[in-house]
Image (cartoon, rainbow, N blue to C red):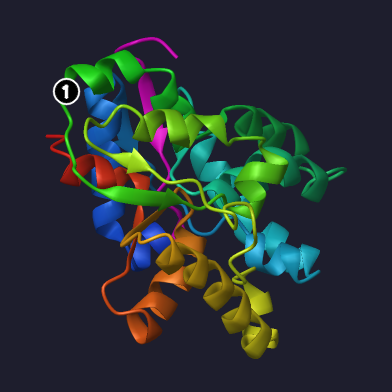
Amino acid sequence: MSLSESVTLFATCIGDLVTPETVEDAERALQVCGCNPTPATGTTCCGQPAFNAGFHRQARAVARVTARALSKTRGPIVVPAGSCAAMMYRHWPELFAGDRDEQLVRAVARRVVEFTAVLAAHCDELRAANLHLSRRVGYHDSCHMLRELGLSAEPRAVLGCIDGLELVPLSSAERCCGFGGTFAVRYPEVSVAMADSKLDDVVAEGIDMLVSADSGCIMQLGSRAARAYAGLRVVHIATVLREAGLR
């Protein structure tokens, strides 16, 4: 991705409704990296909750609106949520196979790129921003981002651009947070136990900030931390960049 390239920033449902400040942080980070982000308009959900629950017809109905809106944009489509990026890039072509919009969806899916994958290609620009944050942090790999998109080094490279930040390896880094969309609703006790298992590992390492690049995981782990782990923050990587001085 070249400098000054126009990109479309797809906020996702959680970004729109729950964490708009994270979307603002992501937009600023893209600007610092030399990109020209334009917010996606006319979009709804990527269809992942319905798709994961096996309701493919309903997932298509939701995703179709978003895909058609994104088809009218230009440049890469940057998604600051690993699971949504995986749904769009990997599963949309499967979901729309044989559909009247198959070719449109395939063209959109090819343009989807996860947020930290963009930033990792512009580490020189991030270092030039003189970022500093004296914190010991842990990083949580979301299941979809790690296993479906194969992104692990990229977010860690982005965190490595922050002077003073110590990234502490976690034994539970690749373990599921227990959210899984509708999984957390269907099996709440199991979901909470999985979240607590991860957070116990974080606390044992003396870390007070857990970072991720997936808004669903952050909502799951952050809500549990607020209830049962006083002093532990769970934040998006774009927020860490802002707190490190990204302006």
Taking the view exactly as shown, the residue that stands out farthest to the top is 2
Residue 152 percent across, percent down from the top left: 57, 36
Residue 214 percent across, percent down from the top left: 49, 53
| Secondary structure type for disc 1 | loop
Quadrant housing residue 14: bottom left
Mark 1: give few (<14), some (14-19) or many (20+) Cα within 10 Å: some
Q: Is residue 176 left or right of residue 98?
A: left
Q: Is residue 194 above or below residue 209?
A: below
Q: Amino acid at mark 1?
A: Ala
Decide whether residue 63 is among the magenta residues: no
Which quadrant is home to the N terminus? top left
Q: Looking at this view, is 168 or 227 the one in front?
A: 168
Residue 7 percent across, percent down from the top left: 39, 27
Q: Residue at x 67, y 83 (%)?
A: 190
Do we see residue 73 in this rendering?
Answer: no
Q: Residue at x 53, y 77 (%)?
A: 196
Q: Is residue 167 left or right of residue 239?
A: right
Q: Is residue 111 left or right of residue 81?
A: right
Q: Looking at this view, is 88 or 58 the one in front?
A: 88
Residue 9 percent across, percent down from the top left: 39, 38
Do we see residue 103 in this rendering?
Answer: yes
Which quadrant is home to the C terminus? top left
Which stretch did the figure color magenta?
Answer: 1-13
- Name the residue tied to disc 1: 129
Q: Residue at x 35, y 21 (%)?
A: 6
